[in-house]
Each structure stands twice: as C-alpha cells, then as structure tokens.
Image: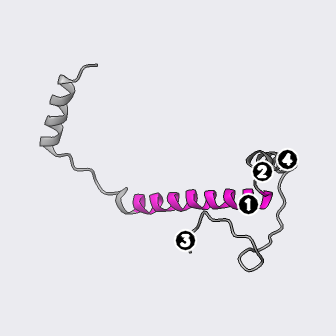
Amino acid sequence: MPLTTRYERGHTHDMKVAISVPDRISRAADQAARRMRVPRSQLYARAVEAYLKKAEGQDVTERLNAVYGDEPQERDPFLEKAARATLRRARW
C-alpha cells in the first residue's frame, strides 16, 4: 500500500494505537508538535511514515545489492586508459 503525506482526520481513516515511548522522547515530541503547530498524533504519523519510506528505500538497495553485488567487476581497458588520461590533465 503506497504511503501518502496527507494526514486523515476522522474515525473512518485512522486507527488508534497505544504505544510506549521513553519520557524524554515523549517530551521532545510534544515540544516539536507545539513548535510545528500540529497535533501530536499527526507528528507521530509523519514520523512513522518517514521511517517506513526510508526503510523501503533501504530494502530496494539491499535487493539491488543482492542481485548485482556479487558479480565480478570486469575492467574495460579503454575506460581505464581514458580515466588515467583525464586524471593526468585534471588540475589538483
């Protein structure tokens, strides 16, 4: 299911969830919500959504590494020669 950035209000689209977080995180979240002028539940929803997007991106990277990571790297002699010539001309 794709994630959306829209925060839904109302009983039909939201699920109430009870979680326990350390006091320091709860206080920091409360301060952030007040500073951002958003409800605390919206702050938590945004945080979870951002985490899931990041985790999804990491999953894609892991899958790509699994497919391409073990392939032997064959060096192209032409590309090596061109890279060396470019480095020799570059100002350091």
Looking at the image, which residue sits at the far bottom?
12
- The majority secondary structure of the magenta stretch comes to helix
Q: Residue 44, percent across and down?
A: 74, 58
Residue at the disc numbered 2: 33
N-term mark: 3 or 2: 3
- Which amino acid, by three-letter code, is at mark 2? Ala
Q: Are marks 4 and 1 in contact (CB under 8 Å)?
A: no
Residue at the disc numbered 4: 27
Q: Tag count in the figure? A: 4
Residue at the disc numbered 1: 42
N-term mark: 1 or 2: 2
N-term mark: 4 or 1: 4
Q: Which mark is residue 2?
A: 3
Within the magenta stretch, is there residue 43?
yes
Determine the CA span between mark 4 and mark 1: 15 Å
Q: Is residue 87 above or below residue 48?
A: above
Camera-near label (4 vs 1) is 1
Within the magenta stretch, is there residue 88?
no
Query: Would you say 19 lies left or right of 92 here?
Result: right
Q: Secondary structure at mark 1?
A: helix
- Which amino acid, by three-letter code, is at mark 1? Gln
Determine the CA span between mark 3 and mark 1: 18 Å
Range covered by the magenta-colored residues: 39-66
Q: Secondary structure at mark 4?
A: helix
Q: Are marks 1 and 2 in contact (CB under 8 Å)?
A: yes
Determine the CA span between mark 3 and mark 4: 30 Å
